[in-house]
Image (cartoon, rainbow, N blue to C red):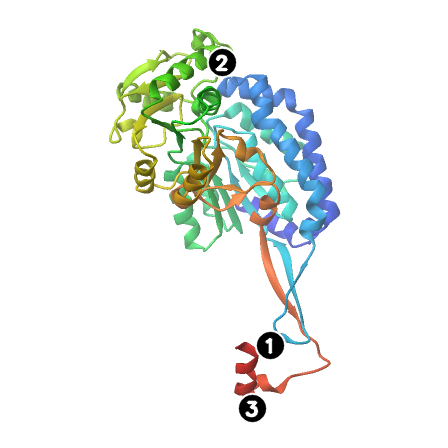
């Protein structure tokens, strides 16, 4: 691993990755490779997570192609040095901001969207002019192998390298001196990453998670709320960092909404979701065992069926859940939706404020004043009004957490900025030299006070 990092550092300092033509060419190669490997990616996702071709393309492949298209279209303007205003005290000079790549970056990818969340940060790293080492998840070995084969086939190791392995591999990689670390995963591991990076003051982006609420007020369009919550919660069997983790519904409309949710689950996944060939499975025995323990934390009003051999849990809705129930103490990351009620929105705001800041929040209401109240009253990474998940699919919006749900953001231009240091430069004139700034100036302080007041 030390050899890979040193090779990449040497290549980075040749200046090749800074060339705009080089970056654009590499992004084109990546785009073409994704298209060429699409059947292999779909097959690997089916083997690892039982994802359907539809889900694989919409959540893992299509997004990346759109991201590359958007990035290549705008990269020239993003990479240009930008002029900045110059204060009176700097009269005669020119101020500039140069976007500069960090150098050799480490990207540690998760298992829930194993292709998408390995390649999306890579797009930003390459666009900014960095080299990259990618560590795919060991929980999705087939996808990991495809990533290795695809990237080794188009990039030299000195530019982009893939390192496979388990936690010991991640630990070993973190001992190397990277210039930037991008991690997507759990809060627990994110703390380890940050602690290790702090020893060398290495900058990090942490895309973590948390308990993201879906709040449905009494005036919401319940038909749409049911469809969009079921879609957002149970896609990839709930193994999505921004999935609605739990449902907070106004007590006056709870029963009606739950009936619509149950009907929507049947429509989306059939009478027996465990027999649906396109319904995703839980990634491992460990996660499966953790999830089924939550089934005892409330009354099962929909789903609840499990298949340990296939690692399947049907879309499940739990009513009668308490705030101190085990299912409410950690991010669920599975197809289980706890339901709680509220009488007044003000109480919801007070309760959520006491919890760790979530990665996402979803609010369903037709009242614009209430919509703005939720947006301004609660801290969270990002979210939607009257929908779920779709905010993360826009290249025009930054995606990231706040507090325990993450540090930093990316997507679109924000990916380029994530992997770029903004270097400030003042180009000073040599035609004149103002003596008031020097200590031997008689009226220097008086002039400086006037200029800076």
Q: Are marks 1 and 2 in contact (CB under 8 Å)?
A: no
> Residue tagged by mark 1?
89
Q: Earlier in the sequence, mark 1 or mark 2?
A: 1
Q: Quadrant of residue 345?
A: top left
Q: Position of residue 233 (x, y in %)?
A: 44, 24
Q: Residue 340: where, in percent of width, then height?
A: 31, 26
Q: Which residue occupies 52% across, 77% down?
A: 453
Horizontal arrangement in the rendering, residue 179 relative to residue 247 (left or right): right
Q: Secondary structure at mark 2?
A: helix
Furthest residue in direction bottom, as rendered:
442
Residue furthest out toward the right: 21
Look at 73% across and 41% down and name the residue there.
25
Q: Residues within 10 Å of mark 3 (few under 14, many from 20)?
A: few
Foreground residue among 87 and 274: 87
Q: Residue 136: horizontal and vertical position, in percent?
A: 52, 33
Q: Is residue 21 left or right of residue 3?
A: right
Say whether marks 3 and 1 touch (CB < 8 Å).
Answer: no
Question: 188 above or below 259?
Answer: below
Give the CA distance from mark 3 to mark 1: 15 Å
Q: Earlier in the sequence, mark 3 or mark 2?
A: 2
The residue indicated by pointer 2 is 268
Q: Neighbour class for label 1 at 10 Å: few (<14), some, many (≥20)? A: some
Numbered disc 3: secondary structure = loop
Vertical placement of residue 13 versus 363, above or below: below
Q: Position of residue 314 (x, y in %)?
A: 40, 14
Quarter-of-image position of residue 209: top left
In the rendered structure, are the residues bearing label 3 and label 2 in contact, judged by CB atoms less than 8 Å apart? no
| Separation (CA) of disc 3 from disc 2 | 79 Å
Label 3: which residue? 443
């Amino acid at each position: 691993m030390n050899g890979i990092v040193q090779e990449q550092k040497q290549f980075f300092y040749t200046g090749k990755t800074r060339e705009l033509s080089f970056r654009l060419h590499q992004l084109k190669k990546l785009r073409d490779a994704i298209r060429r490997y699409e059947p292999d990616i779909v097959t690997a996702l089916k083997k690892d997570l039982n994802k359907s071709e539809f889900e694989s393309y919409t959540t893992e492949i299509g997004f990346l192609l759109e991201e590359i298209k958007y990035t290549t279209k705008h990269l020239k303007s993003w990479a240009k040095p930008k002029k900045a205003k110059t204060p009176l005290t700097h009269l005669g000079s020119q101020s500039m901001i140069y976007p500069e790549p960090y150098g050799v970056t480490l990207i540690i990818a998760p298992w829930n969207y194993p292709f998408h969340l390995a390649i999306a940060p890579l797009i930003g790293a390459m666009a900014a002019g960095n080299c990259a080492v990618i560590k795919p998840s060991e929980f999705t070995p087939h996808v990991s192998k495809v990533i290795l084969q695809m990237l080794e086939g188009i990039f030299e190791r000195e530019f982009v390298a893939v390192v496979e392995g388990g936690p010991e591999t991640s630990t070993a990689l973190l001992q190397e001196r990277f210039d930037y670390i991008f991690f997507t995963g759990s809060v627990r591991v994110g703390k380890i990453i940050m602690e290790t990076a702090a020893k060398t003051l290495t900058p990090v982006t942490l895309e973590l998670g948390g308990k993201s609420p879906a709040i449905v007020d009494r005036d919401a369009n319940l038909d749409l709320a049911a469809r969009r919550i079921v879609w957002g919660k149970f896609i990839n069997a709930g193994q999505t960092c921004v999935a609605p983790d739990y449902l907070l519904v106004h007590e006056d409309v709870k029963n009606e909404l739950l009936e619509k949710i149950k009907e929507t689950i049947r429509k989306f996944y059939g009478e027996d979701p465990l027999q649906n060939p396109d319904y995703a499975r839980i990634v491992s025995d460990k996660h499966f065992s953790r999830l089924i323990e939550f089934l005892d934390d409330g009354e099962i009003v929909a789903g609840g069926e499990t298949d340990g051999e296939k690692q399947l849990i049907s879309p499940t809705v739990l009513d009668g859940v308490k705030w101190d129930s085990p299912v409410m103490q950690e991010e669920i990351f599975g197809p289980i939706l706890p339901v709680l009620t509220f009488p007044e929105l003000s109480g919801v705001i007070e309760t959520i404020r006491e919890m760790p800041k979530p990665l996402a929040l979803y609010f369903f209401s037709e009242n614009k004043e209430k919509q703005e109240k939720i947006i301004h009253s609660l801290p969270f990474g990002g979210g939607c009004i009257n929908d779920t998940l779709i905010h993360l699919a826009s290249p025009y919006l930054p995606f990231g957490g706040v507090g325990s749900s993450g540090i930093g953001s990316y997507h679109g231009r924000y990916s380029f900025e994530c992997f770029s240091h903004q270097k400030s430069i003042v180009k000073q004139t040599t035609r004149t030299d103002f003596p008031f700034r020097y200590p031997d100036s008689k009226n220097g302080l008086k002039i400086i006070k006037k200029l800076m007041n």
